[in-house]
Amino acid sequence: MLSFYSSQLTSHASLIVGFVVAFFTLVQARFSILSAGFPPWAFELVVLTVVFAVVYSMFRLVWYGSLSGVLMGTSENAYRDFLSTRKDRMFPHAEVNEYAKQELITYSRVRSLIYRSLGIRSNRANRDVAFIIQLPMIVSFGIASIFASMMFGLSLDWLSVLGILVGIIVVANLLSIELAIPTPKGASG
């Protein structure tokens, strides 16, 4: 599992570097891009997307680093105790991941608030279903909006954008519940 977390840390760190390079490229080429007839709103959307990707990748970097820290600092007895409380069996990697996630969320106050999966019971799927859009995505959008607005003085009406975002979050999360795939008979959920 540590190998998987390590590969995720490496890939997200690489994404951060790539998006930061893209951001500075946009900053440097801003006037030539806009003078070539590129619509200002489209440029602002690209900048917002790049900054969002940097911030969200940082959240993922902290997540996988925290999970690695849990596994490095745990005992085999604690893991066995966790397994003895589980009714359903999963693949070994999934069990280790569930253990690390539960330990992180249980014993870390701040990360628990940020990384706890939010969801609701789906009658169609007959199980709890996590929302598609989680808190780190919303916080990343907020930070990206503030940063991009301060950096470029975005002309978008942010109340309208916020209203659209809230609408998208509600619709996407409702669809994640309504379109959840039912748990097969005989499988534990």
Image (tube, rainbow, N blue to C red):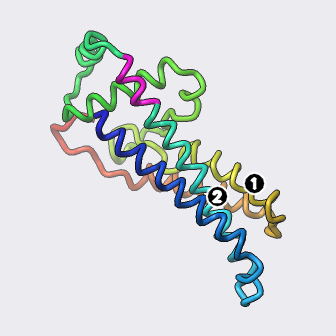
> Where residue 30 sits: x, y (%)?
73, 75
Q: Which quadrant, please, contains the C terminus?
A: top left
Q: Secondary structure at mark 2?
A: helix
What residue did someone put label 2 on?
Answer: 51
Q: Is residue 170 left or right of residue 95?
A: right
Q: Residue at x 19, y 35 (%)?
A: 91
Q: Can residue 143 be spotted in the picture?
A: yes
Q: Is 39 a magenta residue?
A: no
Magenta-highlighted residues: 66-73
At label 2, which amino acid type do we have?
A: Val
Residue in the foreground of this view, choosing between 127 and 169? 169
Q: Secondary structure at mark 1?
A: helix
Quadrant location of residue 8? top left
- Which quadrant would residue 49 be assigned to in this image? bottom right
Residue sitting at x 67%, y 63%: 48
In the displayed structure, 15 sits above or below 6; it is below
Closer to us: 101 or 85: 101
Q: Name the dominant secondary structure of the magenta segment.
A: helix
